[in-house]
Amino acid sequence: MTEPTPKRVTTLRELSQDTEPERDLWPQIEAQLAPARPSLAASNGGAARRAVPPSLRWLALAAGIGCVAVGVWIGRSALPGGVQPPIAAATRPAAGTVQTAWVTDPRYRRDHDALVQSLGAQLASLPPASREKVMKSLTAIRTAKQELEEALGKDPSNALLQELLVNTYQDEMRVLTDVHEAGDAGKGI
């Protein structure tokens, strides 16, 4: 005689719902867990709880407060330019706008100002096509810089805006340096 081939089960729903297990395993599992947690039944609401000394709780609280303080200190020093002094009344922008100086490094300011002052002479020595390209690039960079500074004035903790602003400052310095080098050499960009 041939044995009937068993039906292939493809989902759990096809299994029989009325099949009983040969034996109940839960009493053995519970017996193995009981010695590991003797205070489980005695504790309030069945939740196991270890006694933590109060001094350790205060130490943990102090460590948490210290971590927060260090995080705030690092975050404040990571902002471009750090905390800025208020803008003088004579240079204060119109109401409703926010303005902040994001670069306070004196070396950057000195190098940037020197390159900007020599820009006119350097541009004059470039071919007209290169001059036009440089002016378009600088205009786009300065517009982006202004928009990013305004956005950061409204949301100074936005890391993406901070990174974009730093990249924009670097782009401007690259263009100014390239113009300076190209003007000195008498070649185009």
Image (cartoon, rainbow, N blue to C red):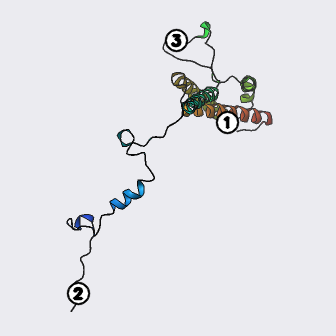
Look at the numbered disc 2 and give the secondary structure of its residue.
Answer: loop
Reading the chain from its start, which is encountered first: label 2 or label 3?
Answer: 2
Q: Pinpoint residue 98: horizontal percent, then vertical percent.
A: 53, 17
Position of 186 with respect to 57 (left or right) is right
Quarter of the view holding residue 126? top right
Type of amino acid under label 1 = Ser
Type of amino acid under label 3 = Ala
Q: Residue at x 71, y 29 (%)?
A: 123
Return the residue nearer the eye: 144 or 10: 10
Q: Residue pushed farthest right?
A: 185
Reading the chain from its start, which is encountered first: label 1 or label 3?
Answer: 3
Quarter of the view holding residue 187? top right
Please state which of the two labelled residues, at mark 1 or mark 3, is closer to the viewer: 3
Q: CA distance from mark 1 to mark 3?
A: 37 Å
Q: Residues within 10 Å of mark 3 (few under 14, many from 20)?
A: few
Q: Pinpoint residue 168: horizontal percent, then vertical percent.
A: 62, 32
Position of 20 with respect to 132 (left or right) is left
Q: Which mark is residue 130?
A: 1
Badge 2 is on which residue?
3
Q: Pinpoint residue 94: horizontal percent, then vertical percent.
A: 52, 11
Q: Pinpoint residue 47: horizontal percent, then vertical percent.
A: 39, 42
Badge 3 is on which residue?
94
Reading the chain from its start, which is encountered first: label 2 or label 1?
Answer: 2
